[in-house]
Amino acid sequence: MVVHHSKYVGDLKEESLVEILEKQNVKGHPVHRLDRKTSGLILFVKESKNVSIFQKMFDDKIISKKYLSLVRGFVSQQEEIDSPIKNESGNYKEALTRYKPLFHLEWNIPVEPYQSCRYTLLEFEPVTGRMHQLRVHANKMAHPIIGDPKYGNRHHNHFFEKYFGYAKLYLHAYSLTFIHPITDEEIKLKTKLPEFWNDLGIMNLDTLYE
């Protein structure tokens, strides 16, 4: 779902996360957002006066964000990609993403143009926060994210849709870490993967949440 309605989602009619929470009498203000098809953690603050404090923490790269993603092909080592990304105004902004491989999958099922298919579970850490940054960088690495309708590989997207019976984006914001600006407490937030990830048969993911 969308976090809140804005110019980025156009005239989309579905309820936003903010609207759903308001119906449940949960009051809060989101200080960042995720793409509509990305699952995971969203940070809310209770009082509007503190929104700018947390937004500045994101801007100043004080809050560490980590994502899990399934990408096409084998990624062999931990690296980073430093490549500018075009914003909604058409201007290029610097963008830096760190990543490391956690797990490899290979199935003897043909996906054009190969006779088998290979995938990597990656941990992404975006240092900057550009729109669609991880999806664009994964594409530039030639390891697009599975289920990405815009930057992904259509052959692998179609394979997952046919094989598993759904079209899902394998990108999940699973971790936020920061020092609370008011209490000075270290905050470590983590959330588990959506259930549809279980179909991949990766059994050792629970160690990520310890």
Image: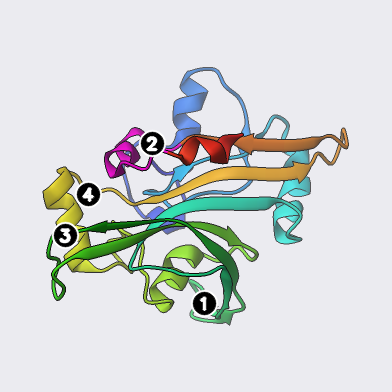
On screen, residue 132 versus residue 130, left or right, reads: left
State the image coordinates of residue 23 (x, y, percent, origin top left): 46, 20
Q: Mark 2: give few (<14), some (14-19) or many (20+) Cα within 10 Å.
A: few
Q: Mark 1: give few (<14), some (14-19) or many (20+) Cα within 10 Å.
A: some
> In this figure, which residue is indicated by the disc labeled 4?
167
Q: Secondary structure at mark 4?
A: loop
Amino acid type, label 1: Ile
Q: CA distance from mark 2 to mark 4?
A: 14 Å
State the image coordinates of residue 124 (x, y, percent, origin top left): 54, 59
Of residues 94 and 47, the one nearer the viewer is 94
Q: Earlier in the sequence, mark 2 or mark 4?
A: 4
> In this figure, which residue is indicated by the disc labeled 3?
108
Q: Earlier in the sequence, mark 1 or mark 3?
A: 1
Q: Which mark is residue 85?
A: 1
Q: Secondary structure at mark 1?
A: strand
Q: Earlier in the sequence, mark 2 or mark 3?
A: 3
Q: Earlier in the sequence, mark 1 or mark 2?
A: 1
Highlighted magenta segment, given as a residue range: 193-203
Asked if residue 197 lies in the magenta stretch, the reply is: yes
Q: Quadrant of the N terminus?
A: top left
